[in-house]
Image (spheres, rainbow, N blue to C red):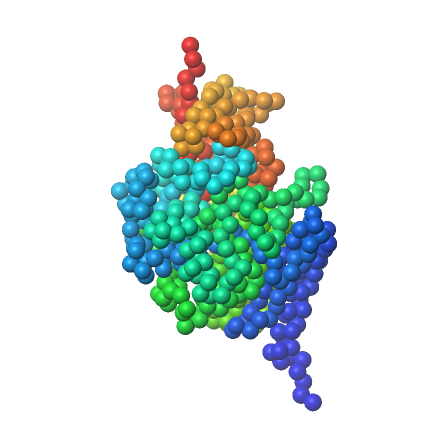
């Protein structure tokens, strides 16, 4: 008999068994779980659910369980816009103000719908603005658009940078509704989900809505056990879809197919066509999807996350491989899991794993922070598992890439422009006082913040006081409590407090006192001074730049 132990079928079976072993530990009756589907050239390879859909009712996840796909929703919104463009009802190069005339004119260069689609508009995001001012206070749909209309500044000039914005996609949902005359969900159902046979996919704008077959969203509770995930504001446009394994695999198969049921081949290609910034630099993000090489093969993908849910949709077109992972609280990250599936199923077709730079090769960078006076940016360097890692805007340190004389982080690491440093600028014997970081091809000068950092109490006299922010529609107080500086922002419907950690007299990091928000990373505070007196603060997060808080004069 022929030896079939090394046949393609045997290798595939072995890979699927290994995938099954990866998720088997998550198959518990006392914890939330996930659903996963894998297909190759339209042939279903794997379809499994583990863990619980409802901890309260003791209902397990099944392959037909509906789950939130969060930001994986974005390319559906983009395709809806492109369908309206095919109808002749709009153009992706229309100014946003043509369809939303209430939006303020903050730049002579747009922004356009194209800028919204590829996150180069510079518009801040309504959900981040809400969280800064209100924490996790819940609101029903409605405040999103007014929050965008209130903005007096952009993060940057349209087309010059890429910075991920749920707010931009929220504006696109509003434009779809105004141009089509239908609700966002009704338009998607009529033009996408219905024609493509996706009966279990829908837009659900708020976590308060009751949806048949939808898994509960769960997060670890601080004292053990579980608590419900509840996104504090509306999700339409940027992250509102719920779907199933079968619907998503059907969508992926159609996306790769040369025969289109809806939309033109050109429109589908635009979803993942890389974006060219004004500098000429390219970003591997198109209209709602990223496309770039991974170990020698091209992948198209998008991840998503809301409170209590995560997702990863990934396709390897050259191998006809489609993967969808949807999680409702299981302790697993779907993006690395999907890449592990690619590695197991494609095996020898992949190039060797990338070698990351060793931290020991760059000892003069470790432990130092660098600040850009021009825009308030902050970077830092650390040793992560022996690799050189860089933090961006006070976020978690991420291992860097190295090649062709450069060190960098890309879109696969952070949802922003490529961040590049010339490795030749780094002296292995002496800590550099300045670094040039290329953000989307544009050089920015960063200056080292020298230790030791000042004591919080020593800064309190000049910093403490009352502030107000028109962009947040909020007031704020900076106080000294138990030796720590505390910034408390009071919105109209809630408040949010952060502890400040000075890195210099004018640059500080902020950590939320909310245990959920604190896990999402830190923010940065830059101090504004005039003639030595503090006149204001500028607050930045990973996705929001320079929210202005103006110092209020004490009343006589």
Lateral position of residue 537 relative to residue 218, left or right: left
Q: Quadrant of residue 498?
A: top right
Q: Is residue 359 visible?
A: no
Q: Residue at left 61%, top 22%?
A: 482
Along the viewing direction, whichever of 433 and 245 lies nearer the viewer = 245
**Quadrant in which the C terminus appears:** top left
Lateral position of residue 425 relative to residue 204, left or right: left
Q: Find the residue positioned furthest to the top.
A: 556
Along the viewing direction, whichever of 340 and 37 lies nearer the viewer = 37
Say if 64 sits above or below 368 in the image: below
**Quadrant in which the N terminus appears:** bottom right
Find residue 210 and report its horizontal and vertical position in percent: 57, 48
Find residue 227 and report its horizontal and vertical position in percent: 65, 42
Q: Residue at left 62%, top 78%?
A: 9
Say if 293 sits above or below 30 in the image: below
Say if 121 sits above or below 482 in the image: below
Along the viewing direction, whichever of 210 and 229 lies nearer the viewer = 210
Find residue 368 and report its horizontal and vertical position in percent: 52, 39
Find residue 221 and report its horizontal and vertical position in percent: 67, 41
Q: Residue at left 60%, top 71%?
A: 45
Q: Residue at left 54%, top 37%?
A: 138
């Amino acid at each position: 008999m022929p030896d079939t132990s090394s046949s393609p079928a045997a290798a595939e079976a072995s890979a699927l068994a290994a995938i099954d072993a990866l998720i088997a530990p998550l198959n518990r009756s006392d914890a939330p779980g996930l659903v996963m589907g894998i297909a190759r050239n339209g042939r279903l390879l794997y379809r499994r659910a583990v863990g619980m859909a409802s901890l309260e009712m003791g209902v397990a996840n099944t392959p037909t369980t509906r789950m939130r796909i969060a930001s994986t929703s974005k390319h559906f919104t983009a395709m809806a816009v492109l369908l309206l463009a095919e109808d002749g009802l709009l153009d992706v190069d229309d100014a946003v103000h043509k369809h939303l005339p209430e939006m303020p004119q903050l730049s002579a260069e747009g922004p356009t719908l194209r800028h919204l689609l590829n996150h180069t508009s510079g518009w801040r995001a309504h959900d981040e603005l809400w969280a800064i001012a209100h924490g996790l206070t819940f609101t029903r749909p409605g405040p999103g658009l007014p929050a965008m209309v209130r903005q007096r500044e952009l993060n940057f000039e349209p087309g010059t940078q890429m910075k991920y914005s749920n707010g931009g996609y929220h504006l696109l949902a509003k434009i779809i509704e105004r141009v089509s005359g239908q609700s966002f969900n009704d338009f998607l159902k009529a033009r996408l989900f219905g024609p493509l046979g996706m009966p279990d996919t829908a837009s659900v704008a708020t976590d308060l809505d009751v949806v048949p077959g939808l898994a509960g969203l769960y997060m670890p509770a601080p004292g053990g056990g579980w608590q419900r995930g509840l996104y504090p504001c509306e999700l339409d446009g940027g992250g509102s879809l719920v779907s199933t394994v079968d619907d998503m695999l059907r969508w992926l198969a159609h996306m790769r197919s040369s025969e289109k049921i809806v939309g033109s081949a050109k429109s589908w290609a635009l979803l993942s066509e890389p974006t060219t910034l004004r500098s000429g630099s390219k970003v591997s993000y198109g209209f709602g999807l990223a496309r770039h090489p991974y170990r020698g093969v091209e992948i198209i993908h998008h991840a998503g996350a809301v409170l209590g849910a995560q997702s990863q949709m990934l396709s390897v077109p050259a191998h006809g491989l489609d993967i969808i992972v949807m999680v409702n609280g299981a302790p697993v990250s779907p993006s690395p899991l999907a890449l592990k599936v690619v590695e197991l199923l494609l095996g020898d077709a992949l190039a060797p794993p990338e070698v990351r730079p060793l931290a020991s090769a760059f000892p003069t960078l470790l432990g130092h922070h660098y600040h850009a006076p021009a825009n308030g940016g902050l970077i830092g360097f650390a040793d992560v598992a022996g690799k050189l890692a860089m933090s961006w805007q006070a976020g978690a340190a991420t291992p860097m890439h190295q090649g062709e004389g450069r060190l960098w982080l890309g879109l696969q690491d952070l949802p922003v422009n490529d961040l590049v440093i010339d490795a030749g600028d780094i002296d292995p014997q002496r800590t550099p006082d300045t670094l040039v970081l290329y953000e989307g091809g544009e050089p920015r000068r960063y200056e080292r913040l020298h230790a030791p950092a000042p004591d919080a109490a020593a800064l309190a006299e000049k910093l403490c006081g009352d502030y107000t922010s028109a962009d947040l529609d909020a007031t704020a107080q900076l106080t000294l409590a138990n030796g720590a500086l505390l910034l408390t922002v009071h919105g109209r419907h809630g408040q949010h407090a952060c502890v400040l950690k000075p890195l210099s007299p004018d640059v500080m990091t902020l950590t939320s006192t909310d245990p959920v928000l604190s896990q999402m990373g830190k923010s940065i505070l830059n101090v504004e001074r005039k003639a030595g007196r503090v006149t204001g603060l500028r607050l930045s997060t990973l996705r929001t730049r320079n929210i202005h808080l103006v110092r209020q004069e004490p009343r006589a």
